[in-house]
Image (cartoon, rainbow, N blue to C red):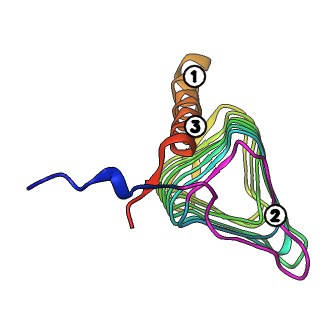
Amino acid sequence: MPEPSLGSAVPVTGTGPIFSLDGVTPKIAPDAFVAPSAAVIGDVEIGPETGIWFHCLVRGDMNIIRIGARTNIQDGTVIHVDSGGFATYIGDDVTVGHNAVIHACTLMNRAFVGISATVLDGAVIEEGGMLAAGGLLTPGKRIGPMELWAGAPAKLLRVMSPEERAKFDRNAVVYRDLAKRYRAGLRSLG
């Protein structure tokens, strides 16, 4: 089968749909990447070199969402807030795996949320803390620094060594570089 002609490729110069709500417009660093199929709405700030990947929803409609630098929000993730007082804060160098739900909680710097995990209202993942794939961090729970939690509901498995935890920091670097590549090279073919 012949390769499609790339002569008709069009650079993707913008980002996914960005929506103002009630006069409040998201603030997105110029070197952040928001995939064309991701939606960012309302009172949201996204820091430098951060990637919001395909089919994500970042909805700051009832409270604020703040996402730091060099963070990656992977494909299919939903980030929302709570009208009862909980905003969503996501620090620097955070990894949020595919299809996660981040709802009205705090993810401190270098937090790691595994694929299809859920973090609920008022929960906190402290610096370097990790919620394993498929985990459910229930409202108000707190994962401490370097702690690995898993299960539904999530429970402490162990405290990771600095060497073990450092292996997961690679994700933030890989996704930062991938976002840069997508900003420069993503083209629409139709």
Against 42, is 33 above or below?
above
Q: Which residue is mark 2?
A: 26
Label 2 element class = loop
Quadrant of the frame with the C terminus: bottom left
Against 177, is 189 above or below?
below
Q: Give whichever of 8, 31 is nearer the camera.
A: 8
Residue 15, picture quadrant: bottom right
Number of the label disc, if any, that sits on residue 166: 1
Label 1 element class = helix
In magenta, the rendered stretch is 12-35
Q: Dot 1, crowdedness within 10 Å: few (<14), some or many (≥20)?
A: some
Q: Give whichever of 80, 13 is nearer the camera.
A: 13
Q: Give whichever of 55, 78 is nearer the camera.
A: 55
Q: Which residue is mark 3?
A: 180
Residue 78 x %, y %: 61, 67
Q: Residue at x 91, y 78 (%)?
A: 23
How many angstroms separate mark 1 from mark 2 (CA)?
32 Å
Q: Dot 3, crowdedness within 10 Å: few (<14), some or many (≥20)?
A: some
